[in-house]
Every structure is written in C-alpha cells, then in structure tokens.
Image (tube, rainbow, N blue to C red):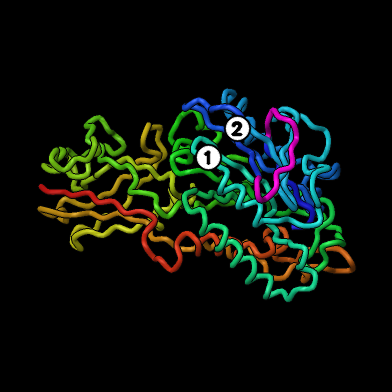
C-alpha cells in the first residue's frame, strides 16, 4: 500500500538490505530450544493512521501485547526490520519499539510512496530459517509505482500472478494470516491516487502474517512455553485467521486415547489397542470395543492441528467422516489440550447398534479457499471517495475490507495448491469388536 515500512527487532546497527541480498540472519547460533522472532513493520502513509495521536491506540496495543508474550529468552534473539519499497534493518530493540511515544509506523527508512510486496514476501520466505518465525504487520493493501496509470482489473490480475510466482519458489513455509481491526484516523490512499491521501476516521483492518517452517509453527502451538503467544485469538481486535500450510506437510500426529480414567463422558467406552498396527507409539487401531452403561460408543483421540487456523480447528462442520455407512459417526467435541505432540482432543461417537464388526474410519478436512478472505476484500476503493474524503457506507464495507486482498491470497493459494482439491489432512482409525 502507499508509504510502507517493515521492522525487525534486534540489537544491531541499522543496515540497508537490498532485495538481491537482504540478509537479516542472526549473527550467532541460536540455542536449539529457542526461536528467533523477526518483526517486520510496514510504514506507509496509510499505515500512519493506525497510530496517530487521534486514535485510541488499539493497533499498537494489540501489537505490543503479542510481542510481550514472546518468552524472554527468545526475545533476546529477536530482530527488528522496517519495510516499504525494500527491507531495512533497524537498530531499535523490542523494548524501544514497545515504549516509544511516537507513531510506531513512522520511520526515516525507505520510500513510503509504495510497498514492494514482491521484495517483502520473497525476503520472508527465503530468509526465515529453521529456528525462526517472521511476523509481518501490514494493512496488505497492494500498491506499486505504476498503479496510478494502470487499469484496475489489470492491477487485480497482476497482484494474483505476482504472489503465485513468489510463493511457488518457496513452498516450504507455513503462512498464518491473521486479520485484526482497530480504530484509524489519518490519510488513506486509493489505488489510483498513490500520492494524494484522503482523510478517513473509523475502523480499518490490518494483518499479522506469520511465516515459519512447519516444525517451528508446530512448536509454537504445541510447546507450553509459547502458549500465551500462540493464543492470538485473544488479542483485542482479532477478527479471523487462515493457515496456508506448506504443501508437503505430512500426516499429522494422532493417537486414540485408551485411558479408562477419561471421564469427558460419564458413560465411557472401553477399548484396547491393536498393537501390531500402532505407529511409533501412536494408536491408530482399536479392538474389543465395549460401550459403557449406555448405547453410545465414544472414541477420543489426540491430534496435532497446528497446520490449520483456530476457526478451522474447532468448527465441526469443516470435518468430514467417511466410514461404513451404517456406522454414522459424528464429532461430539473438539477441545484444545496441552500435549507434547498434539494440540486438540477430538471425540467421535456412534451408537451400539450401529457399531460394525470391522470399520475403517477416515477423518479429514477438505481444502477450500476461506470465505472470510473473499468477504474482506474489495476490488475498487475509489467507491468510498465522497467530497474529497473517505466515507464508509451503511454496510461498513470500507471498515472491514482491504483492496485486492482476495487476489493476493488466491495467488498464495494457487502457488501452494493449484487446482488440487485434496484434503488438508486425512487420518484413519481402524476398529473391530
């Protein structure tokens, strides 16, 4: 978008990082049990309105809350950068950023007239290492030097094609997109007027983009050390999220829970493991299944759902269960848990008279492009210009939508999955009486 900046929090001398040789690597080895967090803050004309003196400071509050949840030992290894027309290293510490009395999106680095998302995302993808997690804070509004004279539809095609090219080159990272919302008071720049801001006062969306290899992303959501940080849904202004999981992500950890002390349901089911079908201690097959005092048969299992967003994890309608048609299994609960390998416990159930002698239960989550991203995108931000200002309509479309967001995200989706309609994951649990 217009006038942008990217920031990493670190303890180093400010250095310009070209798109050819961006650097940004840590200067010393990182301990194995530590994650290096890289923070990228976008600074642009239309980002300034999120933290002007006339706002309530909701955006800064959410950002600092998230950063304060980073464990102290990890924070010491963190890096701080600024982005707009390029990626620039900054010498501020995390504490400097949090305690600053100035606008957090203000910076002397770079050209704030446009944002080079090709450079920024290429940096995030190619320079986020095995033990690192990069965080971009941006309004994700697409803007380039050439947009002023370009056809609007051409621009929309351009952003989708650009993201596809960039992300196809680096498909080994998980990308977590988090939509936030805060109050805004300042200038907004429509796509064909990059050098002339129009005043707007009201709410606006902005985004966190987490980038990491799957092992690191999984660590964030399974290691108790990062429990507070990973609970991004509790941040003030949180609206929605979606995980673009790396295409090569393997079958997740899952294991049936045999513990007879499991009393989630009073009429618990007794079962045994088919040991010969266990995989590395994970129970994937059960036998001698006996209902409790009632007719219901409950099968609880722990599973790692770190490859999908919070909303997908807990939405029963997103899951698909295939088994013997007579079995009619349903999901009766999905609960977050603290576990070294898993993030959730899911319980499926059927009734005694529907339980088959042998069955192969397949539980999956079909992959679909998220509706909320489409609903959060607008194709023409000029429609909100009224008397040389930006004014929202009765449907609050401007306060909830971002120019070309759908096209940007479809570019990522196309690069990662193409026309592949495969499931995000699929697991199997075999049963017999």
Q: Secondary structure at mark 2?
A: loop
In which image quadrant can residue 193 be found? bottom right
Q: Position of residue 86 (x, y in %)?
A: 72, 50
The answer to if 12 sits in the magenta stretch is yes
Q: Residue furthest right?
A: 387
Task: Give the residue drawn at x 65%, y 39%.
Answer: 39
- Name the residue carrying label 2: 26
**198 sits left or right of 379 in the view:** right
Compared with residue 360, is residue 33 higher up or lower down, i.e. above or below?
Answer: above
Q: Is residue 267 visible?
A: no
Q: For marks 2 and 1, give the CA distance.
A: 10 Å
Identify residue for label 1: 129
User: Is the stretch drawn in magenta largely helix, strand or loop?
Assistant: loop
Location of residue 89 in the rendering, given as x and y in whole percent from the top left corner: 71, 39
Give coordinates of residue 14: x percent, y percent. 75, 35
Whether residue 235 sits left or right of residue 357 in the image: it is right
Q: What residue range appears in magenta? A: 9-21
Asked if 161 appears above or below 262 in the picture, the reply is: below
Q: Secondary structure at mark 1?
A: loop
- The quarter of the image holding the N terminus is bottom right
Report the disc number at residue 245: none
């Amino acid at each position: 978008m217009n006038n942008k900046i990217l920031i990493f929090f670190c303890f180093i001398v400010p250095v310009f990082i070209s798109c050819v040789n961006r650097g940004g690597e840590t200067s010393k080895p990182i301990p194995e049990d530590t994650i290096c967090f890289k923070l990228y803050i976008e600074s642009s004309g239309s980002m300034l309105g999120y933290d002007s003196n006339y706002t309530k400071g909701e955006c800064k509050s959410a950002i600092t809350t998230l950063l304060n949840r980073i464990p102290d030992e990890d924070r010491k290894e963190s890096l701080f950068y600024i982005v707009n027309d390029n990626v620039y290293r900054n010498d501020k510490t995390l504490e400097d950023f949090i305690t600053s009395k100035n606008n957090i999106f203000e910076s002397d680095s770079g050209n704030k007239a446009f944002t080079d998302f090709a450079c920024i995302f290429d940096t995030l993808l190619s320079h986020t290492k095995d033990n690192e997690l990069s965080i971009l804070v941006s309004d994700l509004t697409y803007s380039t030097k050439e947009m002023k004279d370009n056809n609007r539809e051409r621009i929309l095609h351009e952003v989708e094609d650009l993201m596809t090219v960039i992300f196809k080159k680096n498909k080994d990272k998980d990308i977590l997109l988090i939509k936030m919302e805060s109050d805004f008071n300042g200038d907004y720049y429509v796509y064909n007027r990059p050098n002339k801001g129009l005043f707007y006062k009201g709410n606006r969306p902005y985004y966190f983009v987490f980038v990491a290899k799957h092992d690191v992303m999984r660590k964030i959501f399974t290691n108790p050390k990062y429990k507070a940080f990973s609970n991004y849904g509790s941040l003030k202004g949180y609206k929605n999220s979606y995980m673009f999981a790396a295409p090569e992500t393997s079958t997740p950890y899952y294991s049936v829970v045999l513990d007879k002390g499991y009393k989630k349901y009073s009429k618990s089911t007794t079962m045994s493991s088919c040991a010969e079908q266990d995989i590395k201690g994970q129970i994937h097959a059960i036998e001698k299944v006996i209902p409790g005092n009632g007719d219901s048969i409950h099968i609880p299992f722990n599973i790692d759902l770190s490859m999908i967003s919070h909303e997908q994890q807990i939405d029963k309608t997103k899951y698909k269960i295939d088994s013997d048609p007579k079995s009619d299994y349903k999901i009766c609960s999905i609960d977050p848990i603290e576990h070294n390998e898993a993030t959730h416990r899911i319980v499926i159930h059927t009734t005694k008279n529907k339980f088959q002698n042998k069955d192969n239960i397949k539980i999956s989550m079909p992959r679909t492009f998220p509706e909320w991203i489409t609903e959060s995108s607008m194709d023409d931000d000029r429609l909100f210009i009224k008397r040389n200002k930006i004014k929202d309509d009765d449907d609050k479309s401007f306060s909830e939508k971002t120019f070309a967001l759908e096209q940007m995200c479809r570019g990522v989706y196309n690069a990662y999955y193409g026309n592949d309609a495969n499931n995000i994951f699929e697991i199997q649990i075999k049963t017999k009486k």
